[in-house]
């Protein structure tokens, strides 16, 4: 399980994805390092706009290029760098080896094709299966994601499914070619709380069954605590802390991570013991022209003059616990 | 589905009745008299004229005449032309095929231009191709057909003498020469109408495709590892076609209107020129019948649009 001892499945280092806009270059991902081991669940957390989705989309090269561009860095997939690959080579990796599900199940499926056709399409593309075989696989996948009467539902259109059911269909589609890594980009954000729990449970079950690794992108610390083994915290296009889930919640080091954890509502304490929810004051810096030094400095209570000089590197301060902060 | 069709056809009946009432009333109230010409003809004595008016019931009130027209019409009797003394249905059937062929071919040409050009431009927005296509499309639909038609005649008939500019329904040839003669005389009107429609549809297809390109399910399709060609044809164009189909069908009345002008310019013996000449001659039975045929065609195309719409978009059900 330990990503550092074995060769990681996916290893991203120094990744920079920039977007050219009329106002200048947006440094959405600006030097991200992270690794995922085989069968591991890695949580990637951070607030909106911190670059976590762009990182995920960059892995599969799903960002619009132009205006997007991978300016620097490596994306090693089982030791092979994906950055220089052309579209034809990337196609063989998409869904077959690395699959992705998105935030909005309501809009992620094409409204004019049956869900069966949309799942079967993946199988036909990667396994050159016949129409019949591919459709049988679709039924089987729908059964695995616990959609009732799959042999009937396979002929239904997306609008005949609820949001949670559509996310199940997306999971079925993503796993239909048995990928080694599933990128789940905020898979529960658009869903009701009860449905969220069901989808997270389903992802866990699917992981048991297929043994794939999961890169779970979320802004919800609760989801991370429940699902992930290791966590990467991102802020303004960079990784600020990385640790195991237990370690991160017990001993958060980076002031930003500490702020994130303090902002989780606690209902397990009596009302009189409950502290007022603490918000992190200030706003995320613009990624158009980010300040030099630590990007969190402007919002950090511990900031010193040195913080605004040079950006701190991500350093391992304890085994398995990395942080990018000059305090450590 | 068949129930839906039946219901739609039944709904068309009151619409057509309403249209015919309005048409008939306007024609009855309009100045002009089909026998006006006879009045100035000294060879026709006034009492003959009066007898003719009486015979054709022109002295009856409007609603009586309308009901008489409706009864005859529903029995398949479209009346006969006061001017050419031929049954109206014969007259229309002579003219309709030419119009349908010219309009049909021009619409096919327009789609053949608009679909590939619009799609290609939209998948490469702001590229050189996109900008050139956009500019040409803008020029294309800014120039009215009566202008481009005359320019075409000047260039291809008068100056170059490649194509005839008078359309003939009778061509004195057989076999290949006969077919070629028909094609040759149809080239200019079809091109004028087709390029005009194609230009405006290109812009529409482009914006429809651009709307779809950015949607989540297109990213899903790419994430599946599908080839870009499949992503475009299956997941983008198919969805972008839904609004395009509506536009094409709803523009049909305008197309028929435009065809009337084009038929005048190229002297095409179609239904449009029949309408113009019958209006000039106050030939009410013919005007009534031709406008009624237009109304039927418009309603028919709306129905076709609805059926295509439901076929393209499964979220729409026929209930």
Image: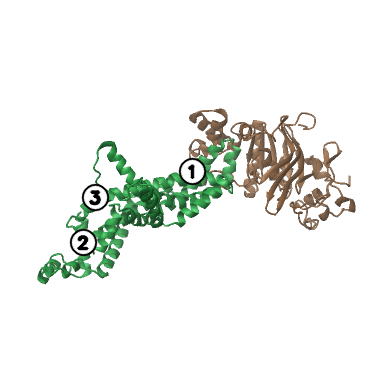
Chain colours: A brown, B green
Q: Which residue is mark 3?
A: B94
Work out whether mark 3 precedes mark 2 in sequence or the reverse, and give the earlier one. Answer: 2
Q: Are marks 2 and 1 in contact (CB under 8 Å)?
A: no
Q: Say whether residue A69 is left or right of residue B112.
A: right
Dot 1: what SS? Answer: helix
Residues marked 3 and 2, same chain: yes
Measured as percent of width and height from the top left, residue B176 is found at: 29, 36
Q: Give neighbour class at mark 2: few <14, some 14-19, many 20+ (Cα, 10 Å).
A: some
Q: Is residue B303 visible?
A: no
Q: Separation of disc 3 and disc 2 at Cα? A: 22 Å
Work out whether mark 1 precedes mark 3 in sequence or the reverse, and give the earlier one. Answer: 3
Q: Say whether residue A12 is left or right of residue B95.
A: right
Dot 2: what SS? Answer: helix
The answer to whether residue B254 is above or below residue A257 is below
- Residue B26 placement: quadrant: bottom left
The answer to whether residue A184 is above or below residue B287 is above
Work out whether mark 2 precedes mark 1 in sequence or the reverse, and give the earlier one. Answer: 2
Q: Separation of disc 1 and disc 3 at Cα? A: 35 Å
Q: Which residue is mark 1?
A: B116
Measured as percent of width and height from the top left, residue B241 is found at: 47, 47
Dot 3: what SS? Answer: helix
Badge 2 sits on which subunit?
B
Measured as percent of width and height from the top left, residue A159 is found at: 51, 46
Q: Give residue B3's mark.
A: none
Q: Say whether residue A110 is left or right of residue A43.
A: left
Q: Give neighbour class at mark 3: few <14, some 14-19, many 20+ (Cα, 10 Å).
A: some
Kindly identify the residue that appears in the image at 21 percent across and 52 percent down: B90
Kindly identify the residue that appears in the image at 29 percent across and 64 percent down: B23
Badge 3 sits on which subunit?
B
Q: Which residue is mark 2?
A: B69
């Amino acid at each position: 399980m330990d990503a550092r001892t074995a060769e990681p499945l996916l290893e991203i280092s120094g990744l920079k994805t920039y977007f050219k806009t009329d106002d200048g270059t947006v440094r959405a991902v600006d030097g991200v390092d992270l690794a995922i081991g085989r069968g591991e669940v890695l949580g990637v957390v951070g607030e909106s706009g911190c670059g976590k989705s762009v990182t995920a989309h960059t892995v599969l090269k799903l960002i619009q290029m132009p205006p997007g561009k991978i300016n620097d860095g490596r994306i090693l997939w089982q030791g092979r760098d994906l950055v220089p690959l052309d579209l034809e080579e990337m196609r063989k990796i998409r869904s077959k080896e690395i699959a992705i599900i998105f935030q909005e199940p309501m809009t992620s499926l094409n409204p004019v094709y049956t869900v069966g056709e949309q799942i079967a399409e993946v199988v036909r593309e990667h396994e050159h299966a016949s129409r019949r075989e591919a459709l049988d696989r679709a039924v089987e996948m729908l059964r695995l994601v616990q959609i009732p009467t799959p042999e009937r539902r396979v002929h239904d259109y997306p609008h005949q499914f609820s949001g949670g059911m559509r996310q199940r269909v997306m999971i079925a589609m993503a796993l239909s070619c048995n990928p080694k890594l599933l990128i789940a980009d905020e898979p529960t954000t658009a869903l009701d709380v009860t449905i969220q729990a069901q989808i997270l449970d389903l992802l866990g079950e699917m992981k048991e069954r297929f043994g794939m690794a999961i890169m779970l992108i979320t802004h919800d610390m609760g989801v991370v605590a429940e699902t992930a083994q290791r966590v990467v915290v991102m802020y303004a296009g960079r990784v600020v802390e990385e640790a195991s889930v237990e370690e991160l919640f017990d001993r958060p080091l980076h002031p930003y991570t500490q702020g994130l954890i303090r902002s989780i509502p606690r209902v397990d304490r009596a009302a009189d013991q409950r502290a007022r929810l603490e918000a992190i004051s200030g706003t995320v810096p613009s990624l158009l022209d980010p300040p030099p030094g630590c990007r969190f400095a402007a919002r950090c209570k511990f900031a010193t003059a040195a913080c605004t000089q040079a950006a701190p590197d991500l350093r391992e301060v304890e085994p398995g616990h990395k942080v990018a902060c000059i305090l450590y | 589905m068949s129930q839906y069709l039946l219901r739609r056809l039944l709904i068309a009946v009151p619409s057509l009745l309403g249209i015919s009432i309005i048409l008939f009333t306007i024609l009855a109230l309009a100045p002009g008299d089909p026998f006006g010409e006879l009045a100035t003809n000294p060879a026709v004595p006034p009492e003959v004229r009066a007898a003719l008016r009486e015979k054709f019931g022109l002295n009856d009130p409007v609603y009586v005449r309308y009901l008489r027209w409706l009864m005859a019409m529903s029995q398949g009797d479209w009346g006969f032309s006061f001017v050419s003394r031929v049954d109206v249905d014969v007259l229309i059937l002579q003219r309709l095929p030419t119009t349908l062929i010219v309009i049909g071919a021009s619409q096919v040409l327009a789609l053949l231009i608009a679909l590939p050009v619009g799609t290609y431009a939209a998948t490469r927005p702001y590229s050189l191709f996109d900008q050139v296509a956009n500019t040409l499309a803008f020029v294309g639909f800014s120039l009215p057909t009566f202008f481009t038609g005359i320019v075409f005649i000047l260039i291809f008939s008068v100056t170059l003498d490649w194509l005839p500019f008078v359309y003939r329904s009778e061509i004195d040839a057989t076999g290949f020469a006969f077919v070629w003669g028909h094609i040759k005389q149809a080239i200019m009107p079809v091109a004028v109408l087709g390029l005009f429609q194609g230009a405006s549809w290109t812009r529409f297809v482009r914006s429809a495709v651009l709307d779809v390109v950015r949607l989540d399910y297109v990213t899903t399709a790419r994430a599946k590892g599908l080839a870009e060609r499949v992503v475009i044809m299956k997941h983008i164009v198919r969805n972008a076609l839904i609004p395009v189909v509506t536009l094409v069908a709803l523009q049909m009345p305008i197309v028929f209107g435009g065809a009337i002008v084009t038929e005048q310019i190229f002297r095409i013996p179609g239904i449009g020129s029949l309408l113009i000449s019958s209006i000039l001659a106050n030939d009410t039975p013919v005007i009534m019948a031709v406008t009624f045929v237009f109304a039927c065609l418009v309603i028919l195309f709306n129905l076709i649009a609805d059926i295509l719409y439901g076929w393209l978009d499964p979220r729409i059900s026929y209930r």
